[in-house]
Image (tube, helix red, strand yellow):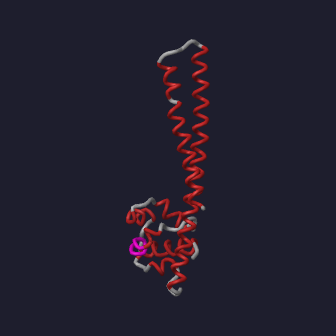
Amino acid sequence: MDASYIGKKISECRKQKGMTQRELAELLNITDKAVSKWERGLNFPDIALLEQLADALQISVTELLGIENTPREQAVLDIAVIAQQEKRAIVKELVTRGWLTVILGVILCIAMIYTSKILADNNIFGIAQSLTVGLSGFYGLLIANGIYSVWKGRKLLQ
């Protein structure tokens, strides 16, 4: 199965039905950007949406996937491969977002420490000082969440 083939099939069927990407997206309760990515062959439709998508386009799932002449066992294997590819893409995004969260947390923590020092150097204590120090727990949670996301994502890839 090929994402570009499925994308072309979705585009052809949608246009034959006189639907816009937005109209198809609304039928499926997704964004028109997702439909656009499918049609350009950048992503596969989510497996949970295949039957609903095929119904909206008034074709069979096997026709949508281009496997109508494929033996059943091979079709199941092809769908499993697509599911694995989508899983890997989602996990990579999870890991990337986890690292970005860690980096953002560290930058904010450094900024908080610097701000606290500037306030102390200028003899500004009280609420402003308490707020900067009090946010350290939040930044710690932010960093921990990022590390957990990276750890969990890598574990899912194994």
Magenta: main secondary structure equals helix
Question: In what quadrant of the picture does the N terminus appear?
Answer: bottom right
- Measuring 58% from the left and 16% from the top, which residue is drawn there? 120
- Measuring 45% from the left and 78% from the top, which residue is drawn there? 61
- Measuring 42% from the left and 69% from the top, which residue is drawn there? 19
Q: Is residue 123 above or below residue 99?
A: above
The magenta segment is 51-56
Q: Toward the viewer: 62 or 114?
A: 114
Question: In what quadrant of the picture does the C terminus appear?
Answer: bottom right
Q: Toward the viewer: 106 or 34?
A: 106
Q: Is residue 113 above or below residue 23?
A: above
Q: In the image, 12: left or right of 150?
A: left
Residue 91 point in image, percent of width and height: 56, 58
Residue 108 point in image, percent of width and height: 58, 33
Question: Is 23 covered by the magenta stretch?
Answer: no
Q: Is residue 83 above or below residue 127?
A: below
Q: Is residue 29 above or below residue 2?
A: above
- Measuring 51% from the left and 79% from the top, which residue is drawn there? 76
Q: How many marks?
A: 0
Tell me the quarter of the picture where residue 16 sits: bottom left
Residue 22 point in image, percent of width and height: 43, 62
Q: Toward the viewer: 70 or 34?
A: 70
